[in-house]
Image (cartoon, coloured by chain):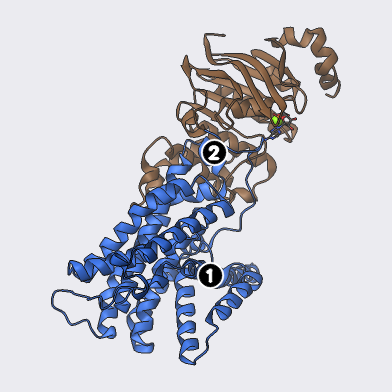
Chain colours: A blue, B brown
Amino acid sequence: MTTAVESEPGAKPGPARSGLVAVSRAPWWVRYALLVAGLAVALWLPNGLYPAVAVDILCWALLAVSVDLLLGFTGLMSFGHAAFWGTSAYLAGIAAIKAGLPFPVAVLTGALGAAVIALPIGYLAVKRTGIYFAMVTLAFAQMIYYVANKWGSVTGGENGLQAVPRELGGLDLSDEYYFYYAALPIALLGLWAAWRIVNSPFGRVLVGIRDNPARARALGYPVHRYKLTAFVLSAFLAGLGGGLFAMGHQFVSLDVLHWTTSGKAVIVVVLGGIGTLWGGVLGAALLVRLEDWLSFSGFEQIGLVTGTIFVLAVLLFRRGIWGTAVDLVRRWQARRGRTED
Amino acid sequence: MAGQALLSARGLTRDFRGFRAVDQVDLDVAADSVHALVGPNGAGKTTLFNLLTGFLPPTAGRIELAGRDVTGLPPEQVARLGVARSFQITSLFPQLCAREHVELALQSPSGLGWRFWRSVKLMGRYRERAEELLDMVGLAELAEAPAEALAYGRKRALELAIALALDPKVLLLDEPTAGMGLEDVDRTVDLIATVRKGRTVVMVEHNMSVVGRLADTVTVLQAGKVLVEGPYEQVRADERVITAYLGAADAAH
Ligand SMILES: Nc1ncnc2c1ncn2[C@@H]1O[C@H](COP(=O)(O)OP(=O)(O)O)[C@@H](O)[C@H]1O
Ligand SMILES: [Mg+2]
């Protein structure tokens, strides 16, 4: 057992208390109002946007919270979540085409498959930290990309999977508008699960591990096993998103496994605010909407725009949209508190 | 007072890229004793702690806890076997408040930490005990303060509270009073004197008056080797030790 520690394992100074903690400490009526507002927006969404875009937002929101569960709450930056998103997309697609499974069951199959492949990948990856962890996840994601590309008899190779059916008890879901409302409960369940994990005794241990792994070990917590569990849970959530994505588009191409998908997931989280959970949902909504608008206006260099946004977010909004908003509210409260004294 | 050896090391050695930080150390820590490790900076005291707690694998040698070979066990397993430590450089979770630290330590032996599907409110079952422990180390008023906002001496006290929360058989304290004011030093000495009952304490300590008040046995390390070992009065009177450190350390007081 080699544990690389300096003679004095010390705590690195962390950022101030994360946005999520701040919200969970807000008065009950603030939390309640935010929840109601969020649900109202979710219910309204396909009336204000193209329903297909609204479905994409649900999928990317799931991917974002899955990445933030690791990046913001465990201190691990995955650069390979395309592996879980894409594997689930293919598995869900195949389950729907070959076995004719109802679409929620196909999505669940995909997500479970993603969790299963996350086990060996995570086992090897969690032994590393920082950039090395990111490299290991990227390497495995690239491997899966090449396997999918070569294994054309199953994945359809360059052509991908075509005409993925979305069955649900004889309902007609061919219209994206209705499909959105069929997909919404799955997405909300996934988001609720992420919130539950972060606000569980397990989530508390993860935050400890993120802030000071050596101290967590000295308390008797098997840090690798906790990280691995978080990794598998995260892959499952990413898989929910990827499976829904396959159903939403009724088509799966190699893009779902491409490294740019992993990169975009990280960008969305940074934009929304690392360690805020709901920030990732906001980031996903904004980026998906923006990309749709850009491609609709015939703009070709979408990657350039997302890249620029990423750089700007890193330089100007270190804490992302959600984190900055929480900051502003807190500063306003502090000022009000001072004038009342 | 001194019973059988609860924690012992044989030929314990650790190299860092050819540099021998701990050199063939034999150590027997008697059950229910307070055992002080002293020696100048760089003598290898902290490295020895890291070896004993599994944070570093030894280059050679063997560690036994209550007769069981624990050499090479990872730190979390050593902790599970009842060895708790504090760190020389305060090592806390900056974003958690003092109470949450102690709750996390109290939760560790249970399986609750795995329950990702349950509410964090379940950790409230440790609240009362956590507040007791915080009160014991004089942190009752600061229970809700985030660790990063605590003053240095308070952080050291919190370190002690979390180590105690593990209810360890062996408590390893790396310079528990370093950087503390006189009042805090006295409080810490009293606290260690209280919590040592039914426990074995190993402490690295530079303050010889603290060592004198607490330690049954003193081991002096120099350049990774054991120089002298024995009861405090005897070690204090030892020629080699006087010339090397104790004279200087006492003169400083
Ligand atoms: N991780 C490490 N890598 C290289 N050298 C180390 C490491 N940890 C400690 N040392 C060296 O080992 C020697 C003993 O250090 P340490 O155990 O911290 O001494 P003490 O706690 O007695 O002051 C020092 O010379 C230190 O520089
Ligand atoms: Mg030291």
Residue B11 pos. (x, y %)? 62, 15
Secondary structure of the residue carrying numbered label 2: helix
- The chain carrying label 1 is A
Secondary structure of the residue carrying numbered label 1: helix
Q: Residues within 10 Å of mark 2 (few under 14, many from 20)?
A: many
Residue B166 pos. (x, y %)? 48, 32
Residue B147 pos. (x, y %)? 60, 48
Most foreground residue, A96 or A191 = A96
Quadrant of residue A158 in the image? bottom left
Task: Please tell me which residue is depicted at 59% across the width and 68% down the height of the picture.
Answer: A327
Look at the image and tell me whether residue B121 can be seen.
no
Residue A96 pos. (x, y %)? 22, 70
Give the quadrant of ligand 2. top right
Task: Please tell me which residue is depicted at 51% across the width and 17% down the height of the picture.
Answer: B64
Quadrant of residue B221 in the image? top right
User: Which-is-in-front pick, marks 2 and 1?
Assistant: 1
Distance between mark 2 and mark 1 Cα atoms:
41 Å
Same chain for the residues under marks 2 and 1 in the image:
no
Which residue is disc 1 drawn over? A267
Task: Please tell me which residue is depicted at 52% across the width and 41% down the height of the picture.
Answer: A216
Q: Does residue B16 appear left or right of residue B125 in this picture?
A: right
The type of residue carrying mark 1 is Ile
